[in-house]
Image: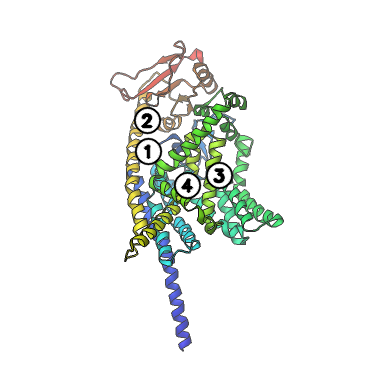
Amino acid sequence: MMSATVVGSDLAARSRVRLTTLAVPAALYLVALAVQAAVVLIVPFTLNEGSAYYVAVARNIAAGRGPVIDALWSYATPPLTLPRNAFELWQPLASYLAAAPMRVLGPNLSSAQVAFALFGALIAPLTWWIAADAAKRLALPADRQRVVAIGAGLLAAFAAPFVLAVAVPDSTLPFAVLGTAACVAMPAAARGNPRAVVVLGLLLGFAYLTRMEAVYLGAVFVVLAWGAGARGPQLLARVGSVALIGALVALPWWLRNVAVFGTPMPGQIVQNMFLTRNDQIFAFLDQPTPGAFLAQGPLNIAHNIGSAALFNLFGVLLVPGTVVAAVGLATMIAGRGQRSAVSGSPLAALLVYGAMAFAATAILFPVATLWGTFAHAAGPLFVGLTVLAVLGADAFVARVRQWRHWSRANLWLAPAALVALALPLTLVEVASAGQQASARKAQVNAAAAYVRSNPALDTSAPLITDQPIWLSDALGVPALALPDEGAQSVLQLARTFGASAVVVSQRDGTAVTGFSTSCFTNVAPPQGGAGATAEVTVLSIAEDCR
């Protein structure tokens, strides 16, 4: 009888521990979801055309058209058609994620943001798990382990890089979640755990369908498997199994690409390595080439790489990440003596991935990364820096407590201070994003009204514009990216696609000076008509020139 009572009490105690263990990550998820959901109310418009691309494709998926788009932003991958099969360079999973709630909530930006908030809030419990693992490996006292883990999860919930990624629905947040989850599964998979191998393969496959930087995560797994003692056939079996499972996930997309583009892998990724200026992304005739890239000379190439590295450090990590990135990087430098304690851990995987992505984007894509290559792939590194920031602040408070002989532990002081510093900065960045989005929405709507108010323009024909995705959505007509190549290239583009007008946003500073007056005529809207005050230039293209 006594034995049964003891067993019952033991089971009840285990149930309470299990419920408590589940309650913490669930609570962190709900906190992160509440914070990210606020973005839906604050940011009413896509902040850049990359985000608009993902949302536009999501609308078409939800409408049953499949992954297509009515705008051409790049001319590097044939066949060049309108409508355009989407994702000749980027990956599709973010648009499918955004499309999921659109049938219920409507085909709009808010639906995409809701989907991203629901998925992106997973970053908080994932960060909690990684921080708990790292604190345990560092042999912190049990009470400090709990505080560090919960503090890291809360900091991730409030950190600007993750919150702002909901406002700009693109590949950034889904890749951060999937890449971080892959790093959680890596240590067990590296030791040969069969279930972890399958999970890791699935996660890497879906991460690849979000961003191609998933290949760096695969390289990190090879490093961890080697560190776990796998050699020869054993290493090949583990890595091969993960690669095979990931390839099976990606196979349907590769087959689709072969069907529509003639190749499973986009050729533009190679072209982006040879950019000498970012506007070449929109090149129609003057495509980037290895010869033109090498013609810059070694000094310019080295300068671009140095500029890219500085941008990745300051423009991607320190400025957007503010206190989280700064304290995390400082902890990484100051705590290098503790590397052996976290070797082979999820935290180590995140940081090794971050170093690979940082170096690869700066060296291989020094021009393209200035427009976001590393920024969109830095999510897993931000998670690692978040964990490091809380560990470093906790260690600092513990040292001060020892120096000052505090009578109280003040365990929550470190994470509370970090959250208190991060939250106002996040609020400022989100508010600024909301203002920018509202201004951009007004500007795009005004430009669309300007075009509609010109009865002389054929609005059924494609438009050539520096805002092809925004204007295509606003006007419901096909649009072509304006190449920065002069009038003759624009005329060749017009002949190829039957375009009848060029629409240029003066606010974006795209120059159309020097265009032949015999082929281009400046068209003004009717006096006092809709869009009369829009900051755009509309040029009609003469019929005999196209």
Return the x and y of residue 292 as percentages of the image width and height.
59, 24
- Given this view, does label 4 or label 2 mark the residue nearer the observer? 4
Can residue 322 be seen in the rendering of this structure? Answer: yes
Q: Amino acid at mark 1?
A: Phe
Question: Answer yes or no: do the residues labelled 4 and 3 have beta carbons within 8 Å?
Answer: no
Q: Residue at x 62, y 25 (%)?
A: 291
Cα–Cα gap, marks 2 and 1: 10 Å
Question: Answer yes or no: do the residues labelled 1 and 3 have beta carbons within 8 Å?
Answer: no
Q: Secondary structure at mark 1?
A: loop
Cα–Cα gap, marks 4 and 1: 22 Å
Occupied quadrant, residue 259: top right
- Given this view, does label 4 or label 1 mark the residue nearer the observer? 4
Q: Secondary structure at mark 3?
A: helix
Can residue 275 be seen in the rendering of this structure? Answer: no
- Given this view, does label 4 or label 3 mark the residue nearer the observer? 3
Q: Earlier in the sequence, mark 1 or mark 3?
A: 1
Q: Secondary structure at mark 4?
A: helix
Which residue is labeled 3 in the image? 356
Q: Viewer-proximal residue, 104 or 25?
A: 25
Cα–Cα gap, marks 4 and 3: 13 Å
- Given this view, does label 3 or label 2 mark the residue nearer the observer? 3
Which residue is labeled 2 in the image? 444
Which residue is labeled 1 in the image? 45
Q: Amino acid at mark 3?
A: Met
Residue positioned most to the bottom: 1
Cα–Cα gap, marks 3 and 2: 38 Å
Q: Residue at x 54, y 52 (%)?
A: 349
Which residue is labeled 4 in the image? 379
Q: Amino acid at mark 4?
A: Gly
Question: Answer yes or no: do the residues labelled 2 and 1 have beta carbons within 8 Å?
Answer: yes
Q: Secondary structure at mark 2?
A: helix
